[in-house]
Image (cartoon, grey):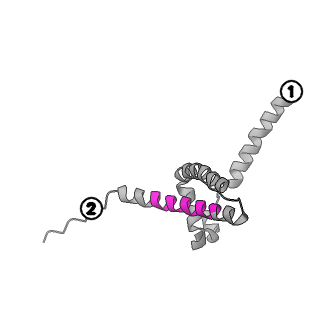
Amino acid sequence: MPIAGRLQDRRGEDHARLSAAGTPRDPHRRPGLEWRIWEPVIKCGQQSLAVFCVGVFLSFVGHFVLSLSYGSVWAQIGVSLGGIAIMTAVAYYISWSKQQDKPSPKPAPAAAS
């Protein structure tokens, strides 16, 4: 078998191992993920497509802002923190918007006496 064929076989094995390693086997064994400090990270993961799209747009905006400034470390830190805050706000907004779209539960009918 040529070397390229063996490398492709290995890539598939490596991908399978990485997928299995990243899959939570027992979610109850991760009490640290329930801490409130991780809530924004989890919310961004739940709304990953919207966060990704906004992040692509913000990367161009950030590049433009940094090209207009002197490119100091403080400008870079400000652009990075601003981008993270905007992406987190978008994730919370999308999550809130999806909750608003769900129909409200109907009240139970009153019992006839």
- Where does the image place residue 85, in percent across and percent down from the top left? 56, 64
Q: In this view, does 101 lie to the left or right of 94?
A: left
- Residue drawn 61% across the image and 49% down it: 60
- Residue drawn 54% across the image and 52% down it: 54
Report the span colored magenta.
Answer: 79-95
- Residue drawn 68% across the image and 61% down it: 76
Q: Decide whether the magenta segment is chiefly helix, strand or loop.
A: helix
Give the mark nearer the N terminus: 1 vs 2.
1
Q: What element carries label 2?
A: loop
Q: In which quarter of the image is the C terminus?
A: bottom left
View extreme (top): residue = 1
Q: Is residue 13 above or below residue 72?
A: above
For residue 106, the mark is: 2
- Where does the image place residue 3, in percent across and percent down from the top left? 87, 30
Residue carrying label 1: 2
Q: Quadrant of the N terminus?
A: top right
For residue 72, the mark is: none
Q: How many labels does the image show?
A: 2
Q: Is residue 26 left or right of residue 113?
A: right
Instruction: Tell which of 54 and 42 is nearer to you.
Output: 54
Residue 28 lies in magenta, yes or no? no
Residue 94 lies in magenta, yes or no? yes
Residue 110 lies in what quarter of the image? Answer: bottom left
Residue flagged by tag 2: what amino acid is it? Lys
- Where does the image place residue 42, in percent across and percent down from the top left? 57, 62
Crowd tier of the residue under label 2, counting other residues whose Cα lies within 10 Å: few below 14, some 14–19, many 20 or above: few
Residue flagged by tag 1: what amino acid is it? Pro
Whole-Å distance between the Cαs marked 1 and 2?
A: 65 Å
Crowd tier of the residue under label 1, counting other residues whose Cα lies within 10 Å: few below 14, some 14–19, many 20 or above: few
